[in-house]
Amino acid sequence: MLNINHVVVVVVVVVVVVVVVVVVVVVVVVVVVVVVEVVVIVVVVVVVVVVVVVVVVVVVEVVVVVVVVVVVVVVVVVVVVVVVVVLFLLLYF
């Protein structure tokens, strides 16, 4: 025969089990959300680093091209000046 004490014990056990299950589910959801946020932050940091590296590489390439063009122009100007001076000296002296 069931008495009131047995019913109270069963109700308390059921309530405790429900509370424990709810707490476990909440903890799991919080952990999953935190892990997803950390993964998103890491991905964003990696993307930013890659973009910065690409920008630096492009800037370095542009600087190298500009330096090469300037050097070529200077060399051409020097060669033209030397040729003109040599021709002038040969023709007039």
Image (cartoon, grey):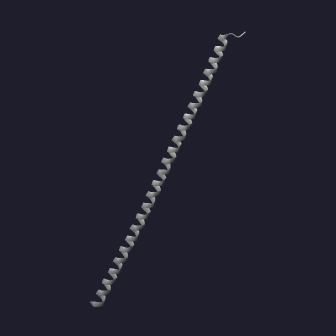
Judging depth in this view, the residue of 45 and 3 nearest the camera is 3
- The quarter in which the N terminus is drawn is top right
* 17 vs 37: above or below: above
Q: How many marks?
A: 0
Whole-percent x, y for residue 49 in the image: 47, 51
- The quarter in which the C terminus is drawn is bottom left
Judging depth in this view, the residue of 48 and 28 nearest the camera is 28
Give me the residue at 42% from left, 61% from top: 60
* 58 vs 34: above or below: below
Q: Say whether residue 71 is left or right of residue 89.
A: right
Give me the residue at 62% from left, 24% from top: 18
The residue lying furthest to the bottom in this view is 92
Q: Say whether residue 9 is left or right of residue 81.
A: right
The residue lying furthest to the right in this view is 1
Give me the residue at 35% from left, 78% from top: 79
Judging depth in this view, the residue of 47 and 81 nearest the camera is 47
Whole-percent x, y for residue 15 in the image: 62, 21
Whole-percent x, y for residue 36 in the image: 55, 40
Which of the 4 image quadrants contains residue 66? bottom left
Whole-percent x, y for residue 81 in the image: 32, 80
Judging depth in this view, the residue of 15 and 35 nearest the camera is 15
Which of the 4 image quadrants contains residue 82? bottom left
Q: Say whether residue 90 is left or right of residue 66.
A: left
Give me the residue at 61% from left, 26% from top: 21
* 4 vs 44: above or below: above
The residue lying furthest to the left in this view is 93
